[in-house]
Image (cartoon, rainbow, N blue to C red):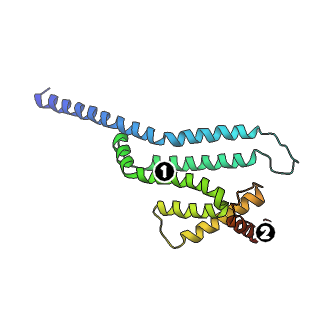
Amino acid sequence: MSQKAVSDRTDELRAQEVEKKERRPVLRSLLLSILPEVVLLAAAMYLFVVALGFKQVGPADQIGPGFWPQVLCVGIGIGALVRLGQKLRSQESRVVGDAASEAGELRMPRVALGVALVVGYVVGMLFLGYILATALFLIAFIYLGGQRKWYVVPLALASSLLFAYVFLKVVYIALPSGVGIFDQLTVLLYELLGVY
């Protein structure tokens, strides 16, 4: 073999080694990025099986205690599968460290505000009642997410009323009605919904 052929072959081998080394972080990054979805999917499947074992307490023609947990597990599983598919289909190759540090620096204030909104929602629900607290929470959370269209407020109000109706009339879960004037407002809204 000539000197040039040996040199070309050596360059080829070096390029392949560099390519393998570059591929490893990308694969590791991909595996780390899909880990939350895989864990959620596994947890949803496990909890679905656990909910199958809940014993029927009331009449056989009514929904059993395991029904809503099973519905929730199916919803979580579908969401995890959809998100897993999105991540696997995306062609972006990011190194986990770089992406995490950039995202962490840019989004930490929003994450902190989101957590504060959730805590405020739980506390606010005790004083304002479920319907008003949920509507205000949805408006603030959607606004924080960047959506500032005209339909956010009507959508939040409609969602709050719809969920209240489902919880009270379908699932039979008592919701906080608030204190003082907010209690009276909640009772009025329940009467308008046909719940009371």
Image coordinates for residue 82, horizontal then vertical, percent: 54, 50
Of badges 1 and 2, the one in the foreground is 2
> Residue 146: horizontal and vertical position, in percent?
45, 63
When the figure is inspected, residue 69 is found, relative to residue 190, above or below; the finding is: above
> In screen coordinates, is 121 left or right of 18?
right
Give x and y (percent) for residue 116: 51, 52
Give the quarter of the figure containing the C terminus.
Answer: bottom right
Q: Where is residue 77 in the image (x, y as percent from the top left)?
A: 61, 46
Which of pointers 1 and 2 lies earlier in the amino acid sequence?
Answer: 1
Given the current orientation, which residue lies at the most extreme top position? 1
Disc 2 crowd rating (10 Å Cα; few below 14, some 14-19, many 20+) is few
Circle 1 crowding by C-alpha within 10 Å: few under 14, some 14–19, many from 20: few
SS for dot 2:
loop
| Residue under the image location 51 percent in, 41 percent down | 36
Residue type (three-letter) at the residue carrying disc 1: Gln
Instruction: Between residue 179 and residue 156, name the one nearer to us.
Output: 179
> Height in image: 11 above or below 156?
above
The picture quadrant where one finds residue 162 is bottom right
Looking at the rendered structure, the kind of residue marked 2 is: Gly
**Which residue position is annotated with label 1?**
86
Quadrant of the drawing holding the N terminus: top left
User: Circle 2 sits on which residue?
Assistant: 194
